[in-house]
Amino acid sequence: MTVTTSAAPSPFTETTGPARHAAFAELAATGPVQKVVLFTGVPVWVVTGYAEARELLAHPSLVKAGGGPHMDAMPADLNAAINTHLLSTNPPDHTRLRRLVTAAFTHRRVEAMAPRIQEITDALLDEMAAAGAGGRPVDLVEAFGFPLPITVITELLGIPPGDRAEFRRWSQIVVNGDVHPAEVYIDAARSVVDYLRELLADKRAAPADDLLSALIAVHTDGDRLSEDELTSMVFLLLVAGHETTVNLIVSGTHALLRHPDQLTLLRAEPERMPAAVEELLRYDGPVQVAIPAVAAAPIEVGGVTIPAGDVVLPALLAANRDPARFDEADRLDITRPASSHLAFGHGLHHCLGAPLARLEGRIALGTLLARFPGLRLADPDTEPARDPGLLVNGLVALPVVLG
């Protein structure tokens, strides 16, 4: 079969309102597997079909190549310190890392955080109420979406509160590294690693009841995480863990405010919140594509052959709106039966932090809606802008009036 490079708009640089979903839909209309040239100039296979994306996410011939943005300029020591983690490795290294990290990042540790997540949520909403008094608009990203997950993940890891603002500046560059110059990205990544190495030294000297101390201490049959594995795993947890949850909270709120029938139903029946979170993840998830992978051998999928050595991007955002898998895929429906969405990936690299993201989403959205029954968009006639970039799908800002 002859394959031509698609001329459809690039979803990754579409930042206005629903244009990103429209661009993915236009790409998908010509087939579930399309060859495109990214805004970085790199040719890749973008997989928009649900069945095809799910198949590839678990395909033994689709492997992680390691690395990330600006690899041609990345110093080897820095690459090792940020990219020796679960999303950049393959079995047996991935199997070993997952076993060690799972032993420290347990469901019990996550569930035990629920009361503290509620306390943080309540305090942030108190501050929002004061800021939004008299009908003044409040940016949900700055006031709630960002500070909640960054506080949760830094408390979970044992990072001091005074360091969070600086970390946010670094992480916003790192998570969208492709849209920043190499020197800017590398400087931010180096700053994160230098900070983490100092923090690891402090935790070794004075262990505490936090995840970072647990990651340092965890061992299986004498095996432990190396220094590069520790910095890489914390790097992943901090950047991926908090940025994605910000987007779940903010994009989820936006979707509900744009669908008043669903918002009314959820307010009347708050027990639907777990199902609502799953539907919000499907409808406008926090991640556009899975971490890029490479075909180790030719792969037949979706009527095409992906040659060995080519880069593959399973498009989670598009797959979750595939009409072949979901009835009325572009409609938000919190009563939708369990959908097995791909917002957290699938297979070996299914998101380890999914339980924490779900817990934060349920508490954050449930408390926000209960606290402010008159919550509404400050400017309902204007669609909020999205961040450009390859991986994340988030809103730059979301001005709301609390009512």
Image: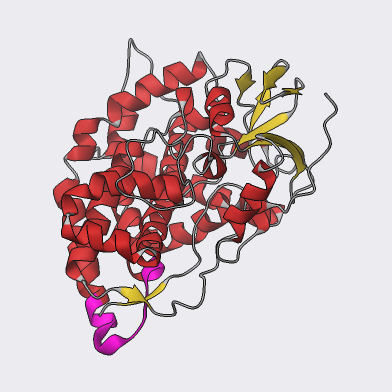
- Please say if 77 is above or below 119: above
- Residue 92 inside the magenta-drawn segment: no
- Residue 138 inside the magenta-drawn segment: yes
x and y percentages locating residue 231 in the rendered image: 46, 37
- Marks counted in the figure total 0
- Tell me: 31 left or right of 362: right
x and y percentages locating residue 144 in the rendered image: 32, 65
- Tell me: 257 left or right of 197: left
**Position of the N terminus by quadrant:** top right
Q: Is residue 36 visible?
A: yes
- Tell me: 137 left or right of 8: left
* Along the viewing direction, whichever of 365 and 196 lies nearer the viewer: 365
Q: How is the image coloured?
A: secondary structure
x and y percentages locating residue 44 in the rendered image: 73, 36
- Please say if 22 is above or below 353: below
Q: Residue at x 67, y 57 (%)?
A: 13
* Along the viewing direction, whichever of 269 and 327 lies nearer the viewer: 327
- Please say if 292 is above or below 331: above
x and y percentages locating residue 29 in the rendered image: 67, 43
- Tell me: 222 left or right of 129: right
Q: Is residue 186 visible?
A: no
* Along the viewing direction, whichever of 378 and 212 lies nearer the viewer: 378
Q: Residue at x 69, y 54 (%)?
A: 183
* Residue 282, picture quadrant: top left
**Position of the C terminus by quadrant:** bottom left
- What secondary structure characterizes most of the magenta part? helix
* Residue 266, picture quadrant: bottom left
| Magenta stretch, residue numbers | 129-142
